[in-house]
Image (cartoon, rainbow, N blue to C red):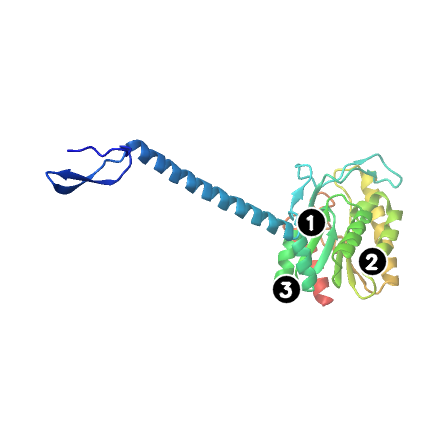
Amino acid sequence: MHQVRGAPRHVAARRRLTLGGVGTLKQVRVHPQHERVSTLRAFLGSVASIFVTLVVLAVLAGALVVLEPRTTDADTTADGTGSYSVPTKGPGLYGSGTLGSWQDLIRRISPEDQIRDVLTFDGIVLFGDSIAVQDSAALERRLADSTGDSIAFHDWSGQPTSAAVDALEEWSRDYGLPRRIVMAVGTNDIFDPPAFAAQVERAMKLAGPDRTVYWVNVYVSRTKQPPAVRDADLANSAWVNDELYHAALKYPNLRIIDWSTFLTSRPDGPTPYLRDGVHTSEPLGGSARNELIAEAIKAGR
């Protein structure tokens, strides 16, 4: 037998050998180390392919995020406490106290794509305070069932009417406004009733004569406050409502949803409908208030 010279022993090949003048073939064994190297290379190649694929998908996803409209969670709480009630202090100028900081209270604001859908399909926008934060999800369902209308919200606990009208102005500038607007604010203006009239004027000018503005009037008599403060709450609520009635005489497209009269005309008074003299009880008060809003919108279609 003659050894084949010049060929590494670990290379897989079929070598022709000569035995007694007869040509034969002999399989040279593949070295185990070579098998491990080949397997490792194949594995690393697969990993590299997967990594490149993931990078490409990540780049595409990032591009889609940039192209999509910015959205905001419709239910967010700034401070994590879930508080609806704005802090007040002292008697203030009008007996109800002074409005404290409200910016960190719970809010409910529709995402941008929902706002644009409402505009596209002739829906409704609503600007509200803590009562609307609590009740607006149920109102959305009620309107969908009763009138088929879609609705977008900018509800923020504790906000006075001036802040709600600021939001109305921002939406008007950024998106435009539909032909129907619901203003469910004024409750927090009992702390400064003279400021309310100018904000109603601002809202009506932003809306213009061709849009209908539905405005829910107010009733406040906070049960945890002393009798003198509760009396001031009622007096200041009436003051705010009077300003709203005067504005309705000037603007025929301003429709008042009379929540205050509904409460005071009930056989048992407001108590069954309010859990604290301000916010609606559930389900009775919330359902009643939403029904008033839905019926007003239905009548104005």
* Label 1: which secondary element: strand
Quadrant, the N terminus = top left
Look at label 3 and name its amino acid: Gly
Which x, y percent locates residue 53?
49, 46
What is the three-letter code of the residue carrying label 1?
Answer: Ile
Q: CA distance from mark 1 to mark 2?
A: 20 Å
Can residue 172 be seen in this snapshot?
yes
- Could you tell which of marks 1 and 3 lies nearer the N-terminus? 1
The answer to whether mark 1 and mark 2 are in CB contact below 8 A is no
Q: Is residue 4 left or right of residue 96?
A: left
Residue occupied by mark 1: 109
User: Would residue 135 be found to the left or right of residue 202 on screen?
Assistant: left
Q: Where, by quadrant of the figure, is residue 36 drawn?
A: top left
Q: Residues within 10 Å of mark 2 (few under 14, many from 20)?
A: some
Residue bearing the label numbered 3: 148
Residue 55, numbered label: none
Give whichever of 202, 191 is nearer the camera: 202
Task: State the mark number for residue 206.
Answer: 2
- How far apart are labels 1 and 3 at the CA level? 21 Å
